[in-house]
Amino acid sequence: MGQEVSKKVAVIGAGIVGVSTAIWLQRAGHSVTLIDREGPAGGTSYGNAGVLAAGSVVPVSVPGLWRKAPGMLFDPKQPLFVKWSYFPRLLPFLFKFLRAGSEESVQHISKSLALMLHDTAAQHIALAEGTGAEKFISTGDYVYGYADEAYYKKDAFGWRIRRERDVQIEEMLPERIAEYDPVMAGRFGFAVRCGEHGRISDPGAYVRTLAAHFEREGGEFVQADVSDISLSGGKATSIHTSDGVIEADDIVVATGVWSGPLAAKLGIKVPLESERGYHIEFVNPSIVPRSPIMVASGKFVLTPMDGRLRCAGIVEFGGLDAAPSRRPFELLREKTLELLPELKYERIDEWMGHRPSTSDSLPLIGNCEGASNVWLGFGHQHVGLSGGPKTGRWLSQLISGQPPNVDITPMSPNRFR
Ligand SMILES: Cc1cc2nc3c(=O)[nH]c(=O)nc-3n(C[C@H](O)[C@H](O)[C@H](O)COP(=O)(O)OP(=O)(O)OC[C@H]3O[C@@H](n4cnc5c(N)ncnc54)[C@H](O)[C@@H]3O)c2cc1C
């Protein structure tokens, strides 16, 4: 990629979005500093389900959710939880989130999600080329497993939207399911195979490997907490960190669910909440499916990973500070062992993390009107692993003065000014 003006760019946040952005900026010839208080993959990018979810173009908020959600919240066997002490703080977000679940709004959201996600596997392959992280990527299918066809038909709205966005879909009855993956035989009465997806066999190691490559290529990594960005005359002048002041020509904010305060400083008041998610891992499992499987009854994903079977999912609204709850871990365990009762394993590891979710389920990608040299890249909710590399590429193109040739204005941060 040719680049005439080499800039000094600081990227705050070393999750999949920040690391992808740093690598694409570096490849475009810029001098890049990557800053994270935890280190690469210290946030949500560590523990996701690893699915390169090309077809995940349907937001969580869909028509009728407001009718279903209360029943789900009071049923401990459903994958939706709320910490009631947090509920009053959640209400303004929830109101906007549910309002964004109209058919018209879902159509709008899904078109932008499709733009970001449709070629996710190819984007990861391009990002990882020559970094050593290629080995974590495999291309393949993503399967939705249902108890029966009637259950599948209850999800008709989502499947109609996916078809409208050209997701490659094969419906499978029990005989075909068994032929597709003998491990799934007899466990589902109906399944849907979505082609042209992929998976990452160890998301934490993947992001760390990409970040190590960035440093080997001359990028600077600073482990520090960013507390503020100074502004003057409509531009950012410096970044204040626990390790001192960093100056840069351009700044990227890719701090995931923690981005609210920095964005507010720039005049962007984004309704951003953590959809807390959980995973458990069965280490050295005796059963490994061929592809990641979304278990529809529990809305969690079983993903084969290096030496383990990761079961990831659950949505819990409870803010950023509260400790993980026990019930989501138990539910994941119960649901997995219901499906795979003969599963043997060495031990179970547990993790909880924060999906960065906006009220309209679209990320913020682009420039801030309030600070012409600051660029935002966060809010990727359930699909940030999938959308991170393309977000990084788009941001690098924008900073290099070569805007992407697709319309990303629905994801502009300025919709929240
Ligand atoms: C259970 C679960 C399953 C998921 N499954 C999938 C999946 O299968 N496929 C998919 O595509 N997505 C999935 N996701 C979503 C995906 O993981 C996220 O959207 C993605 O990781 C967000 O990446 P990010 O780079 O924006 O944020 P993060 O990975 O959270 O990175 C933000 C970084 O910013 C740093 N930071 C924050 N504030 C500061 C500060 N002030 N100073 C310095 N550093 C700071 C943090 O330390 C962190 O490292 C899942 C999420 C969960 C929870």
Image (spheres, grey):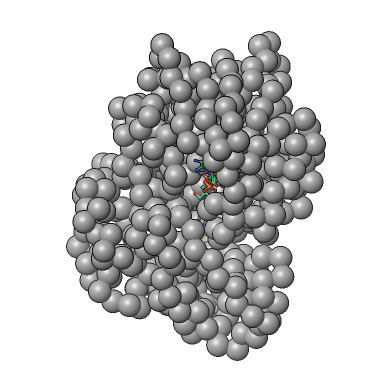
Vertical placement of 274 versus 7: above or below? Answer: below
Image-based side of 220 in relation to 294, left or right? right
Q: Nearer the viewer, residue 164 or 24?
A: 24
Residue extending furthest toward the bottom: 342
On the image, the x and y values in percent for residue 405 come to 52, 22
- Residue at point 35% right, 78% down? 77
- Residue at point 59% right, 68% down? 310
- Residue at point 67% right, 15% down? 6
Q: Looking at the image, how many numbered discs can be counted on the residues?
A: 0
On the image, the x and y values in percent for residue 247 come to 58, 21
- Residue at point 68% right, 37% down? 221
Q: Nearer the viewer, residue 350 or 308?
A: 350
Q: Quadrant of the C terminus?
A: top left
Q: Is residue 335 visible?
A: no
Vertical placement of 73 versus 360: above or below? Answer: below
Vertical placement of 132 versus 304: above or below? Answer: above
Q: Nearer the viewer, residue 405 or 37?
A: 37
On the image, the x and y values in percent for residue 381 come to 43, 49
Q: Quadrant of the N terminus?
A: top right
Q: Is residue 326 visible?
A: yes
On the image, the x and y values in percent for residue 357 come to 39, 48
Image-based side of 29 in relation to 92, left or right? right
Quadrant in the rendering for residue 225: top right
